[in-house]
Image (cartoon, helix red, strand yellow):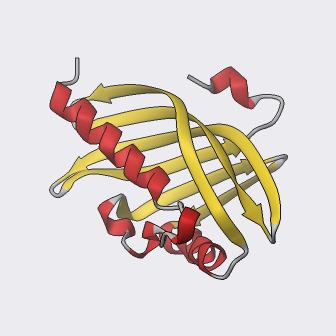
């Protein structure tokens, strides 16, 4: 069983991950400092319908930094609604159900989905090695915590 400190560190990392995209009330998203959350070579994979898109960290962060600062996405935030974490020594997996809402090009939207985060305890602390995510659809709830 993981120590209380390990669980707290992973919970804090996941909270920081979701906070990276929050631009409500004029907040500046934390996308400028992904190294506090991700490994430099982290992989992000999105399942979207029949497509699977794989991105390295820069390819993932760059567009989101633009959308969150140029008005494309405003009043935006995501938050975890449920989770399950498995820890094995210095590696862990977090299955996370989430919701999101905001304005896209001035139009209100909301959604939900599931994310699977693979984590590793690096010399500087826990970091995300990869993220797999699927926005809501007919199958996502089967995997949700």
What residue sits 84% from the left and 47% below the top? 50
Instruction: Give percent across and percent down for residue 15.
Output: 40, 46
Q: Is residue 106 above or below residue 91?
A: below
The picture quadrant where one finds residue 6 is top left
Q: In the rendered view, does 30 fall on the left or right side of 5?
A: right
Q: Can you say which quadrant of the picture contains the C terminus? A: top right
What residue sits 83% from the left and 30% below the top? 138
Toward the top, the furthest residue is: 1
Total marks in image: 0
Q: Can you say which quadrant of the picture contains the N terminus? A: top left
- Front-most of 110 and 129? 110
What residue sits 59% from the left and 54% below the top? 77
Q: Is residue 139 above or below residue 128?
A: above
Q: In the rendered view, does 5 fall on the left or right side of 30?
A: left
Instruction: Give percent across and percent down for residue 9.
Output: 24, 41
What residue sits 74% from the left and 44% below the top? 111
Residue 97 shows in the view: yes
Instruction: Give percent across and percent down for residue 107.
Output: 84, 63
The picture quadrant where one finds residue 76 is bottom right
Instruction: Give percent across and percent down for residue 55.
Output: 59, 64
Residue 23 shows in the view: no
Q: Is residue 29 above or below residue 52?
A: below
Toward the front, the furthest residue is: 25
């Amino acid at each position: 069983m993981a120590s209380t400190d390990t669980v707290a560190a992973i919970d804090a990392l996941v909270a920081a991950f979701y906070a990276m995209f929050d631009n409500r009330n004029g907040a500046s998203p934390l996308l400028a400092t992904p190294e506090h959350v991700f490994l430099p070579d982290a992989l992000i994979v999105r399942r979207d319908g029949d497509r699977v898109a794989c991105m390295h960290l820069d390819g993932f962060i760059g567009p989101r930094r633009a959308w969150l600062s140029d008005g494309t996405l405003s009043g935006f935030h995501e938050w975890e609604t449920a989770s399950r974490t498995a820890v094995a020594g210095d590696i862990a997996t977090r299955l996370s159900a989430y919701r999101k809402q905001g304005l896209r090009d001035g139009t209100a939207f909301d959604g939900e989905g599931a994310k699977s985060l693979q984590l590793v305890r690096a010399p500087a602390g826990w970091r995300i090695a990869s993220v797999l995510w699927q926005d809501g659809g007919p199958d996502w709830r089967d995997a949700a915590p």
